[in-house]
Image (tube, rainbow, N blue to C red):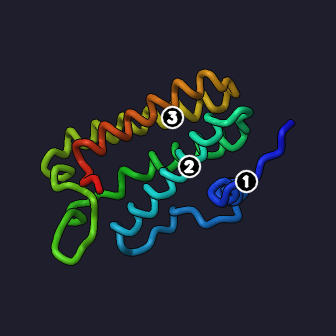
Amino acid sequence: MVARSITGWTAAALAMACGVGVPLLAAPANIVATRIAGFREVGAAFKNINDELRSGSPQTYVIQISARQIRDYARQHYGWFPAGSGPKPGVKTAAKPEIWTQAAAFKAAQDGFAKQANAFATVAGSGDVAKMRAQAKALGQSCTTCHRSFRVEP
């Protein structure tokens, strides 16, 4: 077994899984800050997954922990876009107004992400790395679908 160093994000993921970290369930009063923090966590978890899947010997437990985090955030993210939390003067957000003006399409994109997050968590639990690689692509595509329509890209 080849030992590798654990990245800061991996250590944070492990700490969260062990109950050491503070989850976003106790969200700050500012919903925009909540969703920014939540999506940063999703991005960090997805980076851990991709880093492991690209390595010569993926550590499946890291993938499994990260998959559960993404699944949990996918369940929470429905509450991150209440009316009135969109773009307005003095509020920095990458959320496009279309989130609220095309609510049905946005909900469909959210549902797609949640579905793929659940599917990836299930596949990760199997330990089958080849299936994880395929499902990680589908999960990433669900993110891209939403970003194209509902996020101002940097």
Q: Which mark is residue 45?
A: 2
**Label 1 is placed on what type of residue?**
Ile
Q: Earlier in the sequence, mark 3 or mark 2?
A: 2
- Spatial separation of the CA atoms under disc 3 and disc 2: 14 Å
Is disc 1 placed on a helix, strand or loop? loop
- The residue sitting at the right extreme is 1
SS at circle 3? helix
- Does residue 32 appear left or right of residue 83 in this picture? right
Disc nearer the start of the sequence (2/1):
1
- Amino acid carrying label 2: it is Ala
Q: Are marks 3 and 1 in contact (CB under 8 Å)?
A: no
Residue at x 46% of width, y 68% of height: 27
- Looking at the figure, which quarter contains the N terminus? top right
What's the residue at 73%, 53% (across, down)? 6
- CA gap, disc 2 and disc 1: 13 Å
Q: On residue 53, which mark appears?
A: none
